[in-house]
């Protein structure tokens, strides 16, 4: 029996049980089953179950290779992993809101990646490992002439997406940027489609569409976001890109035509793979690795999937194994907790960075500073007249970006310091990506440096509670400014940034305007008009084959050079 056949034979439906949506330790199963993909042996009553779990059945199947090590699939997988694989293979995306939101996330994320190509520090990390290499039918990297293998392609796309910290955001017990997963998803979708168009047979020979990519994004968002809701990786010193690696692995495995059993294997490999330390995001080690960490997670996800596709197995209890499992080694013995079953919640509630290329916990503080600037102008005052500023904020803001007296040594320090960002807005009435570079007007401004040290943060427990409330998910900041003459301006409170679900309709034109700004420097006007028109036409965009769509972003050179 072939290895693939062994895997398939070990995949069986076990139990289908309804679960509540209350917080639980362990895992949640998929809320509904796509009947189009259901195994015929399942009864109609079971098909309508709102939640179910699917685990590998214990079977004894002789191996045709007597020297092969016993496969982990012979034992039942940790339910957390089984539920992810189950969701990937059996859940049908039905939410029009999620799909429409994914369209805006897709365009916004590509635009953010193109904007990053204007920065040589980013482009220095891109391209083939061996200069001049062109991979036949390989992944094309938007905004560049590169055509790479899907592993390096995932790194390239993932790194440029994340470089400027301007793509979407998810805030909970753990933070993160779910659209980082597009690095892996788009790289694999493009490579699979080009290879199959040339006569290959990856993933049953399918040529994927943009809608396939969007549905993959919805599921990657959901896995990353649901892991983040109740589980704080930062509190044990791990970076949130572990969730990117896990989510990308799950989604990409299905695109590659892997079975549900193989998806479990691949996810287990992602958890055992060793996880990035968060130290590169914090003083004294803040550095540019934080800008390509998601790209690294994307390439690892694709690499692990390809290994499993070629016959590598998995580890059934990679999370729960005593002493040696993820929980005991990296999570202080604590199991994952889940607030809700997998569905479309995360994409429907994701946060867009519309206004400013800034760490998301600062967005409302910067907006408040913008409003205060108008009050200052009306009084004939300016930033030079400010004595002090108090920012009433939430706990996560203080934990991540409260760096009042920390040295601002580089780009990474500045774009993760709420005081620097607010001070820049007060002084220049703007905050742009170029304001973080070492030689920028803001970075060299004595007034910005002086003012940021007079901006203090204090936690408001209600703001913190609202931040974690699944019905609110606000990121509140409130600024109180005291002037040199003793005048105290009325506090300005901003609870929800422009990219919040509460302000989604208000944000949509701004998201498209942001996309237009980001793609315009790279292409001729006719191409820009074509891309914007296509982005505004969901029916045409969804139906377009993904490799043909990526072709529209190909350029003869990189704007930022290398």
Image (spheres, grey):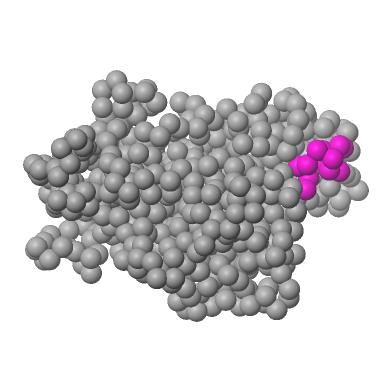
239 left or right of 216? right
- Check the image and report above or below for 62 versus 146: above
Q: Position of residue 156 (x, y in %)?
A: 58, 51
Residue 349 in sight here:
no
Residue 150 in sight here:
yes
State which quadrant residue 45 falls in: bottom left
Q: Say which residue appears at 22% left-offset and 52% top-offset.
A: 4
Judged from this view, the residue extending furthest toward the top is 323
Extent of the magenta region = 434-445
420 left or right of 73? right
Task: Depth check: give the residue in front, 65 or 403.
Answer: 65
Q: Position of residue 252 (x, y in %)?
A: 39, 54
* Residue 437 magenta-highlighted: yes
State which quadrant residue 440 falls in: top right
Q: Position of residue 242 (x, y in %)?
A: 45, 38
523 left or right of 105? right
* Residue 23 magenta-highlighted: no
Task: Depth check: give the residue in front, 47 or 67.
Answer: 67
- Check the image and report above or below for 540 versus 419: below
């Amino acid at each position: 029996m072939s290895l693939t056949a062994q895997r398939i034979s070990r995949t069986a439906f076990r139990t289908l049980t309804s679960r509540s949506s209350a917080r639980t330790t362990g895992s949640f199963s998929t809320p509904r089953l796509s009947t189009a993909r259901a195994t015929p042996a399942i009864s109609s009553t079971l098909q309508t179950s709102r939640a179910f779990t699917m685990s590998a059945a214990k079977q004894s199947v002789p191996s045709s290779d007597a020297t092969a090590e016993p496969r982990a699939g012979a034992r039942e997988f940790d339910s957390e992993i089984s539920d992810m694989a189950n969701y990937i293979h059996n859940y049908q995306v039905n939410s029009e809101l999620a799909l429409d939101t994914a369209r805006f996330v897709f365009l916004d994320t590509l635009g953010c990646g193109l904007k990053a190509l204007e920065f040589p520090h980013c482009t220095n990390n891109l391209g083939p490992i061996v200069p001049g290499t062109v991979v036949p039918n390989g992944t094309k990297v938007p905004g560049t002439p590169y055509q790479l293998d899907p592993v390096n392609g995932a790194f390239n796309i993932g790194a440029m997406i994340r470089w400027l910290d301007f793509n979407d955001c998810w805030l909970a017990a753990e933070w993160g940027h779910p659209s980082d997963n597009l690095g892996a998803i788009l790289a694999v979708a493009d490579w699979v489609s080009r290879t199959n168009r040339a006569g290959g047979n990856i993933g049953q020979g399918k040529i994927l569409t943009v809608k396939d990519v969007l549905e993959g994004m919805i599921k990657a968002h959901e896995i990353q976001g649901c892991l983040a809701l109740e589980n704080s990786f930062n509190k044990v010193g791990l970076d949130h890109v572990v969730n990117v690696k896990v989510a990308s692995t799950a989604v990409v495995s299905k695109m590659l035509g892997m079975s549900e059993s193989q998806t479990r294997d691949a996810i287990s490999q992602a958890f055992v793979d060793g996880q990035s330390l968060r130290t590169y995001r914090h003083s004294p080690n803040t550095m540019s690795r934080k800008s390509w960490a998601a790209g690294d997670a994307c390439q690892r996800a694709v690499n692990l999937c390809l290994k499993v596709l070629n016959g590598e197995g998995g580890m059934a209890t990679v999370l729960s194994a005593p002493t040696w499992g993820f929980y005991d080694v990296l999570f202080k013995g604590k199991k994952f907790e889940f607030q809700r079953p997998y569905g479309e919640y995360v994409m429907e509630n994701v946060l867009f960075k519309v206004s400013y290329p800034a760490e998301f916990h600062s967005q409302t503080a910067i907006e408040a500073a913008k409003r205060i600037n108008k009050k200052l102008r009306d009084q004939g005052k300016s930033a030079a007249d400010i004595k002090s500023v108090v920012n009433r904020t939430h706990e996560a803001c203080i934990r991540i970006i409260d760096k009042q007296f920390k040295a601002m040594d580089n780009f990474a320090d500045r774009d993760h310091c709420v005081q620097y960002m607010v001070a820049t807005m007060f002084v220049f009435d703007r905050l742009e990506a170029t304001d973080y570079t070492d030689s920028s007007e803001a970075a060299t401004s004595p007034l910005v440096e002086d003012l940021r040290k007079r901006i203090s943060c204090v936690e408001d427990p209600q703001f913190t509670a609202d931040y974690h409330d699944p019905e609110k998910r606000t990121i509140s900041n409130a600024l109180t400014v005291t002037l040199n003459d003793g005048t105290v301006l009325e506090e300005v409170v901003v609870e929800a940034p422009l990219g919040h679900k509460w302000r989604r309709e208000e944000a949509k034109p701004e998201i498209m305007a942001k996309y237009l700004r980001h793609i315009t420097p790279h292409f001729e006007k006719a191409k820009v008009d074509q891309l914007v028109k296509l982005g505004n036409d969901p029916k045409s965009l969804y139906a377009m084959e993904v490799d043909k769509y990526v072709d529209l972003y190909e350029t003869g050179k990189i704007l930022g050079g290398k």
